[in-house]
Image: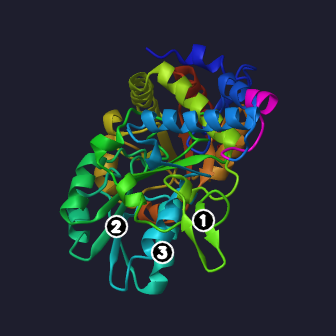
Amino acid sequence: MLDPVRVAKDFPILSKGDLTYLDSAATTQKPVQVVDAIEDYYYSCNSNVHRGIYRISEEATERYEKARENISQFVGSRDPAGTVFVRNTTEAINLLSYTLGRQLKAGDEIVLSVMEHHSNMVPWQFLREKGVVIRYADIDSEGRLDPEDLKSKIGRKTRIVSLTHVSNVLGTVNPVSELAKMAHEASSLFIVDGAQSVPHMPLDVKSIDCDFMAFSGHKMLGPAGIGVLYGKPELLMRLPPFMGGGDMIREVRLDGATWNDLPYKFEAGTPNIEGAIGLSAAVDYLRNLGMDNVRRHEMELMDYVMKRAGEIEDLTYYGPRDPKVHGGVFSFNIGQIPAFDLESELNSRHLKISSQELHPHDISSYLDQSGIAVRAGHHCAMPLMTRLGVQATSRASFYVYNSRDDADKLFIALENAKKAFAR
């Protein structure tokens, strides 16, 4: 079993004891093992990769490519050529929008959902300029993807289905293997936004059978500025490059150029070498914890969080009530009412809605005075906020270094906040 108290000791920023960090959906803290790996690269073999015919450059290249192999294996990819290093999930999806978008024509359709992060919405919306149609699948009263509505949105003109694996607001865990099958039956490509799933649960891109998956290093204990686009190599080979420059070419002439092999065709210029090495160290750390243990810890903690939430009068939280289909994200409001299925929600949870409403920014500021860090706002999901009938939410997000004590601190502080703002 995972011991979050022991795990937290590996994180220098948490060892002081004056910070309860509940914003891991935005970015995670970094264990000393990751920091040490980056530091060792800088101190022992800092140089460019793939180019220098000297010892430290060859060592840097070896570490960089071993990082690619390690990260590829972590998500179940057997071929490192399908692992492209990018800056983050956002860049990975923009890469796909640009390269796949060049192959689309007016009238072609892309299917998303209303729960998507802006990073899996806005890049596809760019394609409206060429007449591509965007269709959105709805959610049900618990914030789960509505399968019937999704089926109705996927048709003979659908070329791409791009969906989040885990919602960064609702915590909803979508059944991506089933969704991949649904997309492929319509002869559509299936893309997974794995930003909130790769760090939190065991997964295998081969078993999911997704065509592409994007995820970020900084959300899984790694450094910022490094992310991954996984793609089936046979599909990546058909795509044009995303950016031009050094290392992505095989030959350059005055009248044109030819492209490098995978994955280098998509990695123009000097890459984030230290970022890849740091992310590989983060993968080692998570592998040592055991991703089954990570997921089990998260489900048990969320079960506890949801039970504690039921003790807070006027608190409304969003997303599935079953921890088995809920990630480590807890979005809530105090005194604000969701738009969907309100009557049944109130009857089932016996809530009493008062006229008192605490703005998420006020909640976040108050919690900060107690050393508790949570997120407040629309969480880069404004269409979802509109669907929920709210302007914003507070969001506490939990990870491997969080315990029940952290949850208790959160709810004690929320009770105190209600009293403070009622004066």
Does residue 414 appear left or right of residue 39 in this picture?
Answer: left
Q: Nearer the viewer, residue 4 or 212?
A: 212
Q: CA distance from mark 1 to mark 2?
A: 32 Å
Q: How many marks?
A: 3
Based on the picture, tell me whether residue 189 belongs to the magenta stretch. no
- Tell me the SS state at disc 2: strand
- Tell me the SS state at disc 3: helix
Q: Disc 3 vs disc 2: Cβ atoms closer than 8 Å?
A: no
| Residue, disc 2 | 160
Q: CA distance from mark 3 to mark 2?
A: 13 Å
Q: Kindly identify the amino acid type of the residue bearing the numbered disc 2.
A: Ile
Q: Nearer the viewer, residue 349 or 224?
A: 224
Q: Kindly identify the amino acid type of the residue bearing the numbered disc 3.
A: Gln
Sooner in the amino-acid sequence: mark 3 or mark 2: 3
Please tell me the numbered disc located at residue 251. 1
Split into 4 quadrants, where in the image is the N terminus?
Answer: top left
Does residue 158 appear left or right of residue 289 in this picture?
Answer: left
Q: CA distance from mark 3 to mark 1?
A: 34 Å
Does residue 419 appear left or right of residue 332 in this picture?
Answer: right
| Residue, disc 3 | 125
Q: Quadrant of residue 109?
A: bottom left
Residue at left 41%, top 86%?
A: 131
Q: Kindly identify the amino acid type of the residue bearing the numbered disc 1.
A: Glu
Sooner in the amino-acid sequence: mark 1 or mark 2: 2
Residue at left 71%, top 28%?
A: 35
Question: Over which residues does the magenta segment extend?
Answer: 40-50
